[in-house]
Structure formats: C-alpha cells, structure tokens
Amino acid sequence: MSDRLFGPADGPTALEPELVTMVAVAVYDRGPSVDRAERYEAQLAGYSVVRARASSSWQAVRRLVSEHRTLLERRWSGAGL
C-alpha cells in the first residue's frame, strides 16, 4: 500500500475531535413504593423541570431525550436554553 493514499505511517491519521457541548443527566431511583412504571426519573442537570419517568433508568434517559429533543437540539446547537 502507498502511504500517500492512507497518509504517513508516523504522522497523525485523524484530527482530534472538537467538543461541541456537554449534557449531564441525573437519574433517580424513586423507590419501590411508587408506581413501578415510573420508578426511575431522569432530569437534565441544572433544569429540574426537564425530566422524564420510566420503569428503568435507561428508559427514563431515553424518554428524557426523546420527549425534550427540540430543547436539547437548541442547547447542542449553541442557542442555549
């Protein structure tokens, strides 16, 4: 293989990724005494009104992202909340 096609063997092969934004999600276990379908609650850190509940922690995070996608896209695009 030619190094010209794939780049030099001893040089950097790709640019370093650039951080665009960070999103923190807090997940809470609400305990066994609450409705099983809403035991876990995910919240966008710093914005307690942006939350979703589900039967597992992963489903709560997934629901949070899907239900608040427009808001999160604005945050990721740099437009802020």
Image (spheres, rainbow, N blue to C red):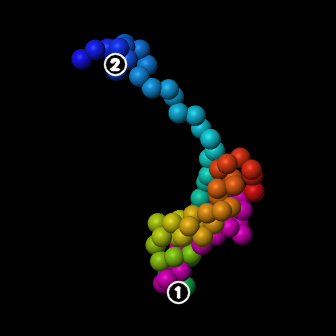
Q: Which mark is residue 62?
A: none
Q: Is residue 31 above or below residue 45?
A: below
Residue 5 spot, x, y in % from top left: 34, 19
Of the residues under marks 2 and 1, which one precedes in the sequence? 2
Question: Does the CB distance between marks 2 and 1 fall below 8 Å?
Answer: no
Q: Quadrant of the C terminus?
A: bottom right
**Element on which disc 2 rests:** helix
Residue 42 included in the magenta stretch of the image = yes
Is 69 or 53 nearer to us in this picture?
69
Q: Which mark is residue 5?
A: 2
Q: CA distance from mark 2 to mark 1?
A: 59 Å
- Amino acid at circle 1: Asp
Residue 73: image quadrant is: bottom right
Residue at image coords 53%, 65%: 61
Residue 14: image quadrant is: top left
Q: Is residue 7 visible?
A: yes
Which secondary structure is most common in the magenta stretch? Answer: strand
Residue at image coords 50%, 26%: 15
Q: Which residues are magenta?
A: 36-52
Residue 11 spot, x, y in % from top left: 41, 14
**Element on which disc 1 rests:** loop
Q: Quadrant of the N terminus?
A: top left
For mark 2, does the 10 Å Cα neighbourhood hold few (<14), some (14 to 19), or many (20 or more) residues? few
- Amino acid at circle 2: Leu
For mark 1, does the 10 Å Cα neighbourhood hold few (<14), some (14 to 19), or many (20 or more) residues? few
In the picture of the structure, the residue carrying the numbered disc 1 is 35
Q: Is residue 29 visible?
A: no
